[in-house]
Image (cartoon, helix red, strand yellow):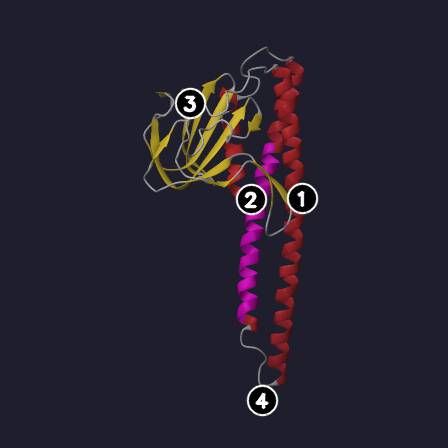
């Protein structure tokens, strides 16, 4: 799931020129804006690199666990097997265990480093948002169309990673969907991106004006193109089994659940 969260942040960074926290409203001081832009670019590159390393470590760990299982499932070699072969097996098992422990430690360090980078990115985005003077209020509760009719599988906010026990932040929510059911636009706006995004599958980004953006991921096929004007409830495409929803108010991710219509 972490890969899914990071891909969405990368997508939003790619359209920063059209949907950045400083694209609308009072123009901030140029030197300060340039400083924030440069720092954000560096932080985003580091975040993507860390995410890639974390994904690689996860793959390495799975491979080593499978290898250790193969080495241990046969138990101990019988006594009539030559001693050197039995010693080699013991050494290989010990080496596999050490490598697994090393991977777990490195994975935990990468998670901690990634959390620190994400915290720094949020701080920089908040500074940019403050410079832009974003004072546009959020829509009223329950006034946006629910993209699909399913229940919430993962909500917005902090959760604990089951593997590392680290506290992580999730910037959107995931809705249960029925494959091929329509995915609807949560509100009126302009489609500014349609395409595949790592971790999200096929994604659509909509600029709703008033510094509000929505990202919808997990679509099977799109019904809109970049530049299309959509109305609230318009068909955007069809769903897979899960649909990701993220809403941003300027630079700040907000909980989509209160804005979306409830299930009845």
Q: Is residue 31 left or right of residue 19?
A: right
Q: Are marks 1 and 4 in contact (CB under 8 Å)?
A: no
Residue 20: x and y in percent read: 54, 21
Does the magenta run of residues contain 250? no
- The disc, 1 or 2, on the residue closer to the chain's N-terminal end is 2
Q: Is residue 217 left or right of residue 25?
A: left
Q: Is residue 122 left or right of residue 140?
A: right
Which element type, helix, strand or loop, lies under badge 4?
loop
- The disc, 3 or 2, on the residue closer to the chain's N-terminal end is 2
Which residue is tagged 2? 52
- The disc, 1 or 4, on the residue closer to the chain's N-terminal end is 4
Which residue is tagged 4? 80
Q: Please tell me in which quadrant of the rendered image residue 38 appears.
A: top right
Q: CA distance from mark 3 to mark 4?
A: 74 Å
Residue at the spot 40% in from the left edge and 31% down from the top edge:
147
- The disc, 3 or 1, on the residue closer to the chain's N-terminal end is 1
The segment highlighted magenta reads 44-70
Mark 3 or mark 1, whichever is nearer to me: 3
Q: CA distance from mark 3 to mark 1?
A: 36 Å
Q: 51 or 204, which lies in front?
A: 204
Residue at the spot 64% in from the left edge and 24% down from the top edge:
126
Does the magenta run of residues contain 68? yes
Which residue is tagged 3? 187
- The disc, 3 or 4, on the residue closer to the chain's N-terminal end is 4
Which residue is tagged 1? 112
Task: Using the image, determine if residue 54 lies above or below residue 90.
Answer: above
């Amino acid at each position: 799931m972490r890969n899914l969260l990071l891909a969405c942040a990368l997508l939003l960074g790619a359209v920063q020129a059209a949907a950045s926290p400083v694209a609308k409203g009072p123009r901030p001081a140029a030197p300060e804006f340039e400083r924030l832009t440069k720092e954000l670019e560096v932080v985003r590159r580091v975040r993507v690199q860390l995410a890639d390393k974390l994904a690689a470590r996860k793959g390495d760990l799975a491979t080593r666990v499978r290898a250790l299982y193969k080495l241990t499932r046969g138990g101990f070699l019988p006594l009539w097997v030559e001693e050197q072969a039995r010693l080699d097996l013991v050494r290989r098992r010990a080496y596999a265990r050490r490598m697994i422990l090393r991977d777990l430690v490195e994975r935990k360090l990468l998670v901690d480093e990634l959390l620190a980078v994400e915290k720094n990115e949020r701080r920089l985005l908040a500074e940019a948002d403050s410079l832009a003077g974003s004072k546009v209020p959020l829509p009223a509760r329950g006034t946006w169309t629910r993209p699909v009719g399913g229940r919430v599988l993962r909500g917005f906010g902090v959760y604990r990673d089951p593997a590392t026990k680290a506290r992580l932040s999730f910037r959107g929510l995931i809705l249960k969907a029925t494959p091929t059911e329509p995915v609807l636009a949560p509100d009126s706006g302009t489609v500014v991106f349609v395409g595949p995004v790592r971790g999200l599958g096929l994604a659509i980004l909509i600029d709703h004006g008033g510094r509000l953006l929505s990202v919808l991921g997990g679509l099977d096929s799109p019904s809109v193109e970049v530049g299309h004007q959509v109305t609230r409830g318009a068909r955007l495409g069809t769903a897979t089994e899960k649909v990701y929803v993220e809403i941003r108010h300027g630079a700040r991710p907000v909980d989509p659940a209160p804005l979306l219509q409830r299930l009845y």
